[in-house]
Image: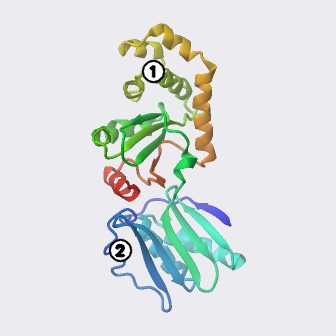
């Protein structure tokens, strides 16, 4: 099976995957001789299927409705260029970062549009976790990344109380973009050292305020043992743990931070609290 990535801009349409499934098909007029199916999970739309003739324009509109992305033009261009050479084959198109279009280019054509899923066992070990029950929200993040800092300031304060109530768990995962953020790796190592003294999340919150560089000073702010902290900063095994998590993110094909998964599902817009809660329902 071949795979491609279509990098697309968000459109004006409201994405439907993760929303209540009822009403999705309203107003959809499939081509003659075709059929559109919806897959539900927890009364939410999980995926949309299509069986019928190859109609790139309709498939683009269907994908736009399911994902909220401006897909009709780029998908039509891709189909015009590639479909004839791929007859009889199974193809997967990554739409943006968070959706997947699976195509079987036979007659009739079969298609499925759904969230991008990764088996949770492939997402590795969760070590820094808030909460004890519920689906796992995994945040692959970088302490020097301004978008990660925004997520920490705007979204996490609304999710942490839910985690403490048992609605979900929040897992921080290291993905330092050290090529462009020189403090990302040292900050991640320092967070590990704070975690060794039971203070990962308070230290995380200080780092996400942009307080980078004086890592021992931040440890003193939290009344951590400065000698143990200083020794930990120099421990190669601590750096190796961070590098191993970064290597996992790269193997998963993650391209930037924050990259967020709710359970097995890649979240398309982690700054949208409503979307996160939709995916929380989907992941239960």
The x and y percentages for residue 210 are 41, 26
Q: Residues within 10 Å of mark 2 (few under 14, many from 20)?
A: some
Report helix, strand or loop for mark 1: helix
Q: Residue 24 shows which numbered tag?
A: 2
Mark positioned earlier in the residue sequence (1 or 2): 2
Picture quadrant of residue 180: top right
- Distance in Å between CA atoms under marks 1 and 2: 47 Å
Tell me: residue 203, above or below residue 79.
Answer: above
Q: Residue furthest front?
A: 133
Q: Which residue matches tag 1?
A: 194
For the point 55% across and 17% down, which residue is it?
Answer: 233
Q: Could you tell me which residue is drawn at 45 percent across and 21 percent down? A: 194
Location of residue 213 in the rendering, given as x and y in whole percent from the top left corner: 48, 18
Q: Secondary structure at mark 2?
A: loop
Give the image location of residue 112, x and y in percent: 52, 72
| Viewer-closest of 183 and 117 | 117
């Amino acid at each position: 099976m071949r795979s491609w990535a279509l990098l697309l801009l968000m459109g004006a349409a409201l994405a439907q995957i993760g929303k209540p499934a009822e009403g999705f098909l309203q107003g959809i007029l499939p081509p003659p001789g075709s059929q559109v199916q919806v897959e539900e999970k927890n009364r939410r739309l999980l995926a949309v299927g299509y069986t019928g003739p190859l109609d790139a324009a309709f498939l683009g509109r269907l994908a736009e409705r399911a994902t909220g992305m401006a897909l009709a033009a780029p998908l039509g261009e891709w189909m015009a260029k590639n479909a004839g050479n791929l007859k009889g084959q199974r193809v997967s198109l990554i739409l943006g970062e968070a959706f997947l279009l699976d195509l079987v280019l036979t007659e009739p054509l079969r298609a499925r549009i759904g969230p991008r899923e990764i088996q949770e066992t492939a997402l590795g070990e969760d070590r820094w976790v808030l909460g004890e029950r519920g689906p796992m929200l995994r945040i692959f993040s970088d302490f020097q990344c301004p978008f990660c800092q925004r997520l920490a300031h705007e979204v996490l304060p609304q999710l942490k109380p839910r985690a403490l109530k048992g609605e979900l768990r929040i897992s921080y995962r290291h993905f330092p973009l050290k090529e462009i953020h020189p403090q990302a790796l040292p900050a991640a190592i320092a967070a590990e050292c704070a975690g060794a003294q039971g203070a990962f999340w308070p230290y995380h919150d200080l780092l996400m305020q942009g307080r980078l560089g004086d890592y021992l000073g931040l440890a003193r702010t939290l009344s951590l043992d400065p000698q143990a902290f200083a020794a930990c900063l120099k421990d190669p095994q601590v750096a190796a743990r961070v590098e191993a998590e970064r290597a996992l993110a790269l193997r998963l094909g993650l391209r930037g931070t924050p990259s967020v998964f709710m359970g097995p599902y890649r979240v398309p817009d982690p700054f949208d609290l409503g979307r996160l809660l939709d995916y929380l329902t989907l992941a239960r």
